[in-house]
Image: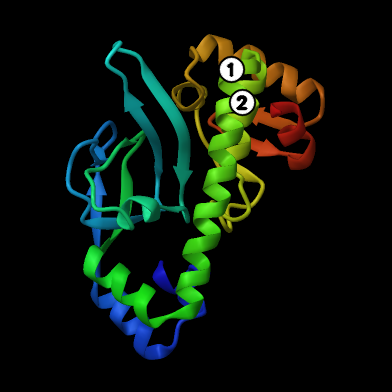
């Protein structure tokens, strides 16, 4: 999995060997935690196979869903750069395999690899844009736009590289990502399909026009 990632392909042989030595694989069952809010930040994570949700529980009892992370996506670089406890949960929505790079390895690559630095900076910039859009969507957009945004985020060309145009995902999983019921997701998917943005089939979604889907999401 490491060899297929864009950042690993730009590393020297010695730097890649260091990255591989400092990375282990973990299996997370459905509904299990990849990482938890409040715990020390010890790893940078990449999804090998499966689907996870980044979220946070508020004091009011509500849960804020930030984004989904599909196979090929890496996350947690911002937390790795700060000396504080993790500020969000990441929960596996299905059985998921995760690559876990040790903190020491991550910082060694930052210190020794310009290509890795560029990748991390680009990741942070893209994720900032994603979260700004999410904030606007939560405040202004209707439910259909929230569903569209949750789906479009899974096809982000930088944060979710190599995913193609189709993802295996249930309506219930989309509901978890968008913060709405499965029944409401079904209505939104019908609307988005009627407009030609995507095709929804049992257990999967195929995006037909990502640009228009993202514009609809706001």
- Residue lying furthest left in this view? 39
Check if mark 2's residue and mark 1's residue have beta carbons within 8 Å: yes
The residue that label 2 is drawn on is 136
For label 2, count other residues whose C-alpha is less than 10 Å away and answer few (under 14), some (14-19) or many (20+). few
Up-down relation of residue 32 to residue 13 (above or below): above
Tell me which corner region of the image, top left, top right, bottom left or bottom right, holds residue 21.
Answer: bottom left
Q: Secondary structure at mark 1?
A: helix
Q: Secondary structure at mark 2?
A: helix
Q: Position of residue 144 (x, y in %)?
A: 66, 17
Up-down relation of residue 115 to residue 137 (above or below): below
The residue that label 1 is drawn on is 139
Up-down relation of residue 159 to residue 144 (above or below): below
Between 166 and 213, the one nearer to me in the picture: 213
Q: Count all numbered tags in the image, as a single digit.
A: 2
Q: Position of residue 90 (x, y in %)?
A: 32, 38
Between 107 and 18, the one nearer to me in the picture: 107
Up-down relation of residue 72 to residue 207 (above or below): below
Residue at 29% x, 81% y is 18
Tell me which corner region of the image, top left, top right, bottom left or bottom right, holds residue 65.
Answer: top left
Residue at 47% x, 27% y is 177
- Residue lying furthest front in this view? 83
Between 154 and 166, the one nearer to me in the picture: 154
Q: Which mark is residue 127?
A: none
Q: Position of residue 204 (x, y in %)?
A: 57, 34
């Amino acid at each position: 999995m490491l060899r297929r990632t864009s950042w690993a392909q730009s590393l020297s042989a010695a730097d890649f060997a260091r990255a591989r030595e400092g990375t282990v694989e973990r299996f997370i069952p459905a509904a299990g935690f990849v990482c938890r809010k409040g715990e020390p930040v010890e790893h940078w994570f990449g999804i090998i196979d499966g689907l996870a949700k980044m979220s946070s529980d508020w004091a009011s009892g509500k849960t804020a869903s930030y984004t989904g992370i599909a196979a090929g996506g890496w996350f947690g670089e911002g937390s790795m750069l700060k000396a504080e406890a993790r500020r969000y949960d990441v929960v596996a929505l299905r059985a998921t395999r995760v690559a876990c790079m040790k903190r020491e390895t991550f910082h060694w690559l930052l210190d020794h690899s310009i290509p890795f630095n560029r990748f991390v900076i680009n990741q942070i910039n893209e994720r900032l844009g994603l979260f700004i859009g999410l904030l606007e969507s939560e405040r202004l957009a209707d439910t259909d736009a929230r569903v569209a945004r949750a789906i479009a985020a899974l096809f982000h060309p930088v944060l979710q590289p190599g995913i193609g145009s189709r993802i295996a995902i249930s309506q219930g999983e989309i509901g978890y990502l968008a913060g709405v019921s499965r029944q409401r997701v079904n209505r939104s998917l019908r609307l988005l399909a009627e407009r030609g943005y995507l095709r929804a089939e049992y257990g999967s979604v195929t995006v037909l026009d990502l640009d228009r889907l993202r514009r609809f999401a706001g």
